[in-house]
Amino acid sequence: MNYLGIDDEAFIRKNVPMTKQEIRILSLAKARIKPDAIVYDIGAGTGSLSVEAARLAPQGTVYALERNPEGVALIRANAANFMVSNVVVKEVEAPAGIDALPAADTVLIGGSGSRLTEILDAVTPKLKPEGRIVLNFITVQTLMQAIDYMREHAAIYEYEAIQVQVSRLQQLGPYDMAKAENPIYIVTCWKK
């Protein structure tokens, strides 16, 4: 049975950044992935979003782009672990490789390696009409770069942005104390 929100501990992670469960759930809900979707996961890290997207699109394909060789190995390991055969891993630094991919229904952007504008420029002509881009950021600077891009391309895109703060309760003796995770910005864009 496929469900949204695989436990973080179920993924093989090592020292590669991973999108946490609650952020994955929100991001994938915003992405509105269809069963036959073509999805790009740019800056795929451990492949946690790639795996969950692949489960939502069993008749589609998820292209996981990652520049870090350790991340590439983890994406492959996690795809095998969750038995999703529709994840295609590309060891590239985006925007390299995007032009060779088929047109996308959905684009997930987690890591941009300080090349967000170039990535969005490469993704824009590849995104199908009414396609969606979901971007996750930890820094305000990258958030503003994405918003500035969307405003400059207002004839093409509409967008919304949210900030999410997740805290988990941690047992401390007889008490439960909130332990905060980093706040994350989620920007969702769609073609008009």
Image (tube, rainbow, N blue to C red):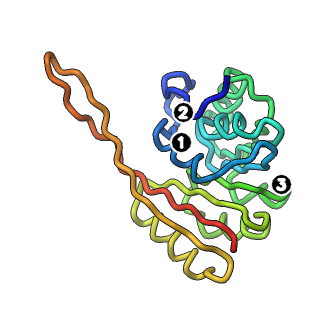
Above or below, 15 relative to 129: above
Q: Which residue is drawn at the image coordinates 53% and 41% (left, top)? A: 25
Above or below, 189 relative to 89: below
Residue 101, label in figure: 3
Above or below, 122 relative to 25: below
Nearest the viewer among 166 and 146 is 166
Residue position marked by numbered label 2 in the rendering: 5
Q: Given this view, does label 3 or label 2 mark the residue nearer the observer?
A: 2
Q: In this view, does 88 lie to the left or right of 133?
A: right
Question: Where does the image place residue 100, in percent across and percent down from the top left?
Answer: 85, 56
Q: Is residue 166 left or right of residue 25?
A: left
Residue 113 image-quadrant placement:
bottom right
Above or below, 76 relative to 164: above
Residue position marked by numbered label 1 in the rendering: 24
Residue 148, label in figure: none
For the N terminus, give its image quadrant. top right
Few, some or many C-alpha atoms within 10 Å of disc 3 (few <14, some 14-19, many ≥20)? few
Question: Where does the image place residue 29, in percent across and percent down from the top left?
Answer: 58, 48
For the C terminus, give its image quadrant. bottom right
Few, some or many C-alpha atoms within 10 Å of disc 2 (few <14, some 14-19, many ≥20)? some
Q: Which residue is drawn at the image coordinates 63% and 36% (left, top)? A: 47
Badge 1 amino acid: Arg
* Element assignment for label 3: loop
Task: Give the mark nearest the N terminus, 1 or 3.
Answer: 1
Cα distance in 3D space between marks 2 and 1: 7 Å
Cα distance in 3D space between marks 3 and 2: 27 Å
Q: Are marks 3 and 2 in contact (CB under 8 Å)?
A: no
Q: Is residue 125 left or right of residue 150?
A: right
Question: Where does the image place residue 67, in percent across and percent down from the top left?
Answer: 66, 46
Cα distance in 3D space between marks 1 and 3: 23 Å
Few, some or many C-alpha atoms within 10 Å of disc 1 (few <14, some 14-19, many ≥20)? many
